């Protein structure tokens, strides 16, 4: 029987250096008989470095070329380690970086987000060029696919929304024949294209989502994301001690935790997979044969307490200026504006004449939203060191530990979930 397609995603940490590229290649070697689409992010912290180029160019600090040179040199060093001094991939990668030079030769584009996408997308383009060349170099036949030929988005730069109908059609027309021809198909995470062929990005950490888009469009048998952790853990190991790996998680638990900030999977990843019942494995690229975490349909599992922390929160208190009830007519207007500025609402509470909402504070979106409603409403914003902590399957001990040293500004509790908007208590010091 013909084997069904698998989709793999390797993030920046897995390909941060030449040893990483070799390690990923050795994992892939054991899947060479499988039809496989491989989605890869930019190497290491390249996206952060490319963001610096964008900011430097926009603010005309004169440092954009210097930052670009650093990014180029780190990639050439990896290429040199993998291929020696002569290989066609040098020219291919260099030609890709030239597109950034063109942007820098011009005056900063008035649309920052547009310019951002044209520059930042280069990270994924070069990482996939290097990995594809390396896989072919070690005799693992691999075809490089431009994700922008498949993933169509709207023209909201930095957070393109997928146009599903066209994307499914493109995947069937372009990606499917490549898969059927045999060998690996390797493509970029994070990037897409508008219908006018301008590059867009899907939002930071969006490569997981790309893999889910391909899984959905090509009816994959399963998707696997390869991480530097053994699987999904009960909390972020960078913040908490004594975390435990979850062997199995339902789509529902996974989407709840990732929406509220569990950084291990991009929150948009789950829906396309759930919609087609495609299982998601989260596995370690450091221990590839270990079972990891399996994410699939609901089961009657007993879950331990799971914690997600989302930093950079803004708490907005919106009240009517004329003492009219906030629930009358006003809500729909406020929500239209929230949608227009693409704010993620994490928690809300209302009284007779006021409405409190906690949102992710991204760039200047909160400020723009506030400006858009200030004529009608009084808005008080607190965004000073606020975090949102979400606990699923809470116990009194877990809540006590989390509250320690914090001021709780808003708390909401349901049967399975506690959410707290909190601030760190400033240490009192004697004069
Ligand atoms: P990638 O290289 O694929 O982009 P990320 O660095 O974005 O990977 O995500 C993996 C990291 O997510 C882990 O190293 C871990 O520190 C962090 N993380 C946060 N919350 C969790 C969690 N609940 N379970 C596992 N890892 C988590
Ligand atoms: N390279 C992009 C980022 O760092 C996308 C991703 O890694 O998922 O945000
Ligand atoms: Mg990531």
Image (cartoon, rainbow, N blue to C red):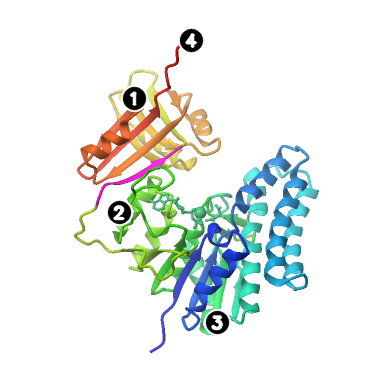
Q: Secondary structure at mark 1?
A: strand
> Of label 2 and label 4, which has the lower sequence position?
2
Q: Is the residue marked by circle 4 packed among few (<14), some (14-19), or many (20+) residues within 10 Å?
A: few
Q: Secondary structure at mark 2?
A: helix
Residue at mark 1 to residue at mark 4: CA–CA distance: 39 Å
Residue 310 covered by magenta stretch:
yes
Does the beta carbon at disc 3 come under 8 Å from ligand 1? no
Q: Position of residue 147 (x, y in %)?
A: 58, 66
Numbered tag placed on residue 354 in the rendering: 1
Task: Report the mark closest to the observer, 1 or 4.
Answer: 4
Residue at mark 2 to residue at mark 4: CA–CA distance: 48 Å
Q: Which residue is mark 3?
A: 183
Proximity of marks 3 and 4: CB atoms separated by less than 8 Å: no
Q: Which residue is mark 2?
A: 253
Residue at mark 3 to residue at mark 1: CA–CA distance: 59 Å
Q: Position of residue 202 (x, y in %)?
A: 53, 54
> Of label 3 and label 1, which has the lower sequence position?
3
Task: Report the mark closest to the observer, 3 or 1.
Answer: 3
The one of 406 and 68 positioned closer to us in this rendering: 406
Q: From the image, give the main secondary structure of the stretch colored magenta.
A: strand
> Of label 3 and label 2, which has the lower sequence position?
3
Residue at mark 3 to residue at mark 4: CA–CA distance: 69 Å
From the viewer's perspective, is 412 left or right of 117?
A: left
Residue 24 versus residue 50 in the image, above or below = below
Residue 352 covered by magenta stretch:
no
Give the extent of the magenta segment: 304-311
From the viewer's perspective, is 192 left or right of 243?
A: right
């Amino acid at each position: 029987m013909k084997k069904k397609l698998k989709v793999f995603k390797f993030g920046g940490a897995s390909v941060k250096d030449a040893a990483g590229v070799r390690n990923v290649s050795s994992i892939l070697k054991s899947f060479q008989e499988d039809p496989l689409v491989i989605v890869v992010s930019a190497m290491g912290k390249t996206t952060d470095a490319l963001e610096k180029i964008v900011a430097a160019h926009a603010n005309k600090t004169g440092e954009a070329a210097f930052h670009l040179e650093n990014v180029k040199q780190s990639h050439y060093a990896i290429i040199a380690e993998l291929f020696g001094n002569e290989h066609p991939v040098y020219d291919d990668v260099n030609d890709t970086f030239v597109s950034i030079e063109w942007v820098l030769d011009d005056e900063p584009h008035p649309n920052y987000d547009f310019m951002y996408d044209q520059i930042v997308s280069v990270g994924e383009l070069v990482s996939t060029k290097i990995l594809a060349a390396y896989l072919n170099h070690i005799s693992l036949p691999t075809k490089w696919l431009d994700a922008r030929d498949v993933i169509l988005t709207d023209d909201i730069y930095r957070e393109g929304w997928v146009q599903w109908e066209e994307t499914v059609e493109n995947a069937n027309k372009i990606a499917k024949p490549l898969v059927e021809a045999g060998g690996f198909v390797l493509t970029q995470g994070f990037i897409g294209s508008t219908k006018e062929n301008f590059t867009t990005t899907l939002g930071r950490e969006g490569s997981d989502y790309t893999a889910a888009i391909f899984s959905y469009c090509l009816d994959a048998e399963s998707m696997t994301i390869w991480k530097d952790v053994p699987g999904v853990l009960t909390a972020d190991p960078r913040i908490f001690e004594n975390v435990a790996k979850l062997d199995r998680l339902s789509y529902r638990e996974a989407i709840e935790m990732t929406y509220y900030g569990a950084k291990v999977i991009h929150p948009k990843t789950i829906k396309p997979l759930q919609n087609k019942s495609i299982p998601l494995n989260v596995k370690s690229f450091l221990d590839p044969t270990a079972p990891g975490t399996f994410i699939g349909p609901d089961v009657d599992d007993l879950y331990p307490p799971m914690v997600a922390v989302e930093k950079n929160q803004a708490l907005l208190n919106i009240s009517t200026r004329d003492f009219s009830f906030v629930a009358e007519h006003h809500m729909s207007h406020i929500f239209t504006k929230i949608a227009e500025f693409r704010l993620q609402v994490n928690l809300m509470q209302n009284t007779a004449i006021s409405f409190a909402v906690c949102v992710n504070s991204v760039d200047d979106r909160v400020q723009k939203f506030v400006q858009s409603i200030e004529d009608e409403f009084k808005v008080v914003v607190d965004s000073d060191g606020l975090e949102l902590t979400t606990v699923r399957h809470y116990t009194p001990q877990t809540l006590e530990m989390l509250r320690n040293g914090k001021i709780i500004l808003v708390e909401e509790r349901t049967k399975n979930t506690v959410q707290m908007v909190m601030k760190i208590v400033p240490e009192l010091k004697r004069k």
